Image (tube, rainbow, N blue to C red):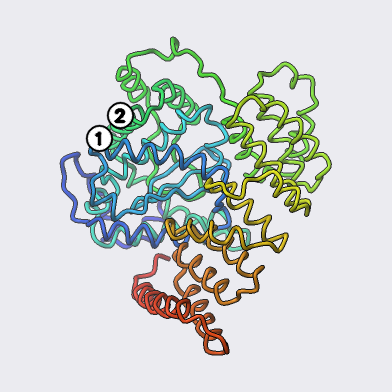
Amino acid sequence: MIASQVLLPVPALAQIQQVLPGMGDGGEMTASAERHLGDQIARELYRDTDYIDDPVIAAYVQDIWQRLLVAARARGELTPELDERFAWTILLGRDRNINAFALPGGYLGLNLGLVAVVGSRDELATVLGHELSHVTQRHISRIMTKQGRQMPLMIAGLILGMIAAGKSRNGDAGQAMIMGSQAMFAQNQLNFSRDMEREADRIGFGVMTQAGFAPQGAATMFEKLQYASRLNDNGSYPYLRSHPLTTERISDMQGRFQFNMDTVPPQPLAMDHAMIASRARVLTRPGVDVLRLWIDSASSGEFAKSSPAQQAGTLYAAALSAKEMRDYKTARALAERLAARVADDPAAAKQARWLGAEIELAAGAAPKAAALLDARSKERPEMLLSAEAATAMRQPAPMIPVLRDWVAANPRDATVWRALGNLYGAQNDTLRAVRADAEANVAILDYPAARDRFKAAQEIVRQSKVVDHYEASIIDTRARAVEVLVKEQAAEPPLK
C-alpha cells in the first residue's frame, strides 16, 4: 500500500479516494467513449495467452448469453443506443479460478474455471445476468466519470500491468510486485458500491428469470460464490472486483424469489452440461498427471456408482484428456463408450459426435471426422470442424460458401475468418486467403497487422496477370478503412 501511494501521482490519489457515485448520479462518459476504452483493453486481452475461442464452449455460453440479451431488451434494461454501440462480446479465458467480470463497452470475461464448476445453465445465467446488468446500468461509466478524466486510462493500464505481472516468469519480480500493488490499490478503491451490487443482483435476477432460467439456479450459484468468497478476485484479467457475497445480499435474493436455501430441491445434472463442464476442466491445462487421473477415472469403481450424467461427464473428460495426450487409440475407445452412454439424449449425443470428430482430426483421419459431421450444419462448432476436415482433405469448395455466409453476418468472428483463409489456401486462392487473414486481424482489433496483410493482398493484385477486379476493389476499400483505424489507434494515449 505504501509503495503504491508513493508511485501514484498525488492528483490520482485524490481522485481515487473520492466517494463512489450514488445510484441516481448521471455520467458524463458517453457510450462511444466507453466502447472505445473497452476496445483498447480487449485488444490486449485478445493477445493474452490465456484467451481461448473454443467453439464448443463458446456456442454453449452464447446460447445463454443471447437469451439474456433478448430478455434485457424486452425489460427495457438494454437501451437501443447501448445495444447498437456496445460490443456485447464474451471473452473466454483458460484460468482455473472461479471468475467472471465486466469490462467497459459491453465486453465480458468468463474464466473456464467458472464454467467448470457451475452445475446448470441456470447457474451460469445467474452470473452472466449479474455482469450484464453492471454494463446495462452503466456502473463502469458512472464510477469512471466520478474518478475524473484521466482515471480510465490509468486503470486500464493497471489492469494490463496486473496481467503482465501475474504471468511474468523473468527475474524482474520486484517491478511486477510494485505494479501489482498499484493495480490492487486502485482496484480496491474502485470496487462497485454495495448499491450497485444490489442493483446488479436485482436486475440480473429479473433478466435471467424472464429469459426462462430457473430461479433455483440463482440460489445455488450464490451459495457457490459465497463458498468461493468472491465473484471476481484472481490475478488474471482483474477488473472492478465485485464485493464478496455477503449474508445480507444472499438473504435479499432468497427473499426476492421467496424460498430458503434449505428447501431448494437439487437441480438434476444435465448430460450435455456435465460434458461442457468437463471440457472446461480439461482445457484449463491442468497438467499431465491430472489428465491421466481423468482417464483412469473412467474405469474406476466409483464410475459405476455415479449417475448417467456424471458418467457422461467423466467419459468426456477422459476421452478429451487422452486426445490432449495424443493417445488416440484410448481416446477413440472412450469416445465410443461416451456415444453409447448418451445415445438417448440428443444434445449430449451431438456433443459426443463433435468430440469424436475432434479426435479423428487430431489423429490425422480427416475422412473419418467428415463422416461424423454434417457439412450443411449452421452450428458454429460443427461448421468449423467440417471446414477443418475439408481443408485437411483438400476438398474446400463445399465449405467455402458456408463460411463466407457466416462471416458476412458475423464479421467480427476471427476464428471463422481464419478457417475460411485456410480453405482458400487449400484451393490455392492466395489473394482471398490473405484477405481473410487480414479480416481476422481486424476482428481482434489488431489494426497494424491487418493493414500489413491488406498491403500484401494489394501487392498480389499488382503482380497478378489475371485480376479479380471485384475482389481487388474490396481489398482497396478495406485497406483504406483500416489505415484510418491504424492512425486513430496511434493517436490514443498508451494504456501501459
Kind of residue at badge 1: Arg
- As drawn, the residue found furthest toward the top would be 263
Q: Residue at x 63, y 51 (%)?
A: 385
Which element is circle 2 on?
Answer: helix
Q: Residue at x 44, y 60 (%)?
A: 408
| Residue bearing the label numbered 2 | 206
Q: Residue at x 42, y 33 (%)?
A: 125
Q: Would residue 157 appear left or right of 224 to someone viewing this image?
A: left
Categorize mark 2 by other alpha carbons within 10 Å: few (<14), some (14-19), many (20+): many
Residue 453 in percent (x, y) is at 52, 76
The answer to whether residue 186 is visible is no
Q: Would residue 323 appear left or right of 201 to someone viewing this image?
A: right
Of the pair 375 and 328, the residue shown nearer to us: 375
Depicted 382 relative to depicted 301: above or below? below
Depicted 360 relative to depicted 464: above or below? above
Residue 301 in percent (x, y) is at 79, 19
| Residue bearing the label numbered 1 | 75
Depicted 186 relative to depicted 401: above or below? above
Of the pair 495 and 268, the residue shown nearer to us: 268
Kind of residue at badge 2: Gly
Identify the mark at residue 150; answer none if there is no mark. none
Quadrant location of the C terminus in the rendered image = bottom left
The answer to whether residue 320 is visible is yes
What is the C-alpha distance between the residues marked 1 and 2? 9 Å
- As drawn, the residue found furthest toward the right would be 329
Depicted 278 relative to depicted 345: above or below? below
Camera-nearest label, 1 or 2:
1
Of the pair 269 and 128, the residue shown nearer to us: 269
Residues under numbered marks 1 and 2 in contact, where contact means CB atoms less than 8 Å apart: yes
N-term mark: 1 or 2: 1
Residue 316 in percent (x, y) is at 69, 34
Residue 276 in percent (x, y) is at 59, 36
